[in-house]
Amino acid sequence: MSGQTVSARCTDSRIVGRHCCGPDAFLLDVEVEQELPLLRPGVFAMLSPANGTGPELGRPFSLYDQHGGTLRFLIQVMGVGTQALDRLEIGELVTLTFPLGNGFIVADPNRPVVMVAGGVGSAPFLLYARHRMQMGCEQNTWVLFGARTADRLYDAEGLAAAGAPMLFATDDGSQGFHGNVIQMLDAELESGRLPRDARFCACGPEGLLHGFADYARKQGLDAELSLETYMGCGFGVCNACPVETEPDGPLGSWKWARTCEVGPVFALSSIRF
Ligand SMILES: Cc1cc2nc3c(=O)[nH]c(=O)nc-3n(C[C@H](O)[C@H](O)[C@H](O)COP(=O)(O)OP(=O)(O)OC[C@H]3O[C@@H](n4cnc5c(N)ncnc54)[C@H](O)[C@@H]3O)c2cc1C
């Protein structure tokens, strides 16, 4: 139920869908030729246009949704790589190396789970929420989703359709809680509406993850982070994405771990972040 691991492959795969989901983001549907089992939330792909219009190196994107051999990615347009992907049309090919990374191990059904997402950091949580709903965990699963403005709560309806209870936060108060997602998490924990004994899973931009890590440490929360570290190759060769590990922590004596190979999901207790 927690999703299978499959050996990674590099293929040129066809774009079969493309949908705008915010002022600077879109959903990209790609058909791979193999029929895939349900994969772990948090695994990722390296993507680049197959027509050579993008940079040499692909860029990493979490698997957002999966239906058999059709994969969906949620992509925020940032710079050269994502702009090149944004220019592609249905029928064109992307070079895809997939699946990569460890992904989240979906928590035991009795364990409450709180997902904390900022912006495109929501990407691993549609599949996580769907796994939990399939396990019958509607009562002890929550998705907290924050963004600067309501129109940057990318594909909020698609994420809500997974069925987990959702709470929204926006910096400008245009939807849900007025403030950032960590302030909302704090308010929910203080009021007792969310349980402190949950597993807290976070993904988002670096600032949000640092804020979350500080908060989770102070509060003694059991937390996991999916890191969005810069990456070159995505599979452990180029050494571009190291994260410092805790000595004698769960990762043993390694001082540095490659985010792409050992992560991108880490227990907060295992890294110095
Ligand atoms: C495991 C993993 C999963 C990811 N999943 C997603 C996802 O599902 N959807 C999504 O939209 N993005 C995701 N990202 C982030 C995405 O890979 C970057 O936004 C992308 O590489 C930017 O490429 P670019 O060529 O467009 O930008 P560049 O031209 O390389 O950079 C443009 C600007 O963005 C900044 N930037 C680029 N990458 C990052 C980064 N990783 N962190 C902080 N700032 C950055 C640069 O400093 C620069 O200012 C993920 C990253 C990782 C490591």
Image: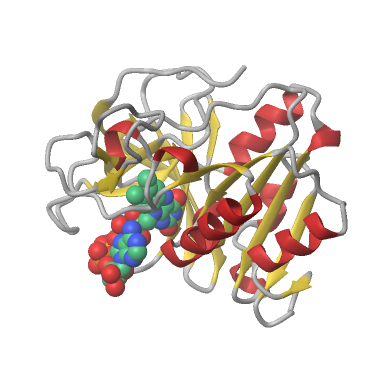
Q: Residue furthest front?
A: 248
Please name whichever residue, 127 or 221, is drawn nearer the observer in this view of the structure: 221
Kindly identify the residue that appears in the image at 32 percent across and 37 percent down.
247
Where's residue 254, x and y in %? 24, 32
Answer yes or no: is residue 268 visible: yes
Q: Quadrant of residue 212?
A: bottom right
Q: Is residue 178 above or below residue 127?
A: below
Does residue 190 appear to the left or right of 131 in the view shown? Answer: right
Residue 128: image x %, image y %? Answer: 62, 35
For ligand 1, the image quadrant comes to bottom left
Residue 205 horizontal side relative to residue 187, left or right: left
Q: Which colour assignment does the render follow? A: secondary structure
Does 191 sit above or below residue 173?
A: above
Residue 133 horizontal/vertical position (percent):
75, 30
The correct choice, above or below, for 194 with respect to 266 in the image is below
Comparing 246 with 193, the one in front is 246
Q: How many marks?
A: 0
Relative to 73, residue 199 above or below: above
Percent across and percent down for residue 167 are 77, 57
Determine the residue located farthest toward the bottom in the rendered image: 172
Which of the two residues, 197 or 74, is positioned nearer the viewer here? 197
* Quadrant assignment, res 93: top left
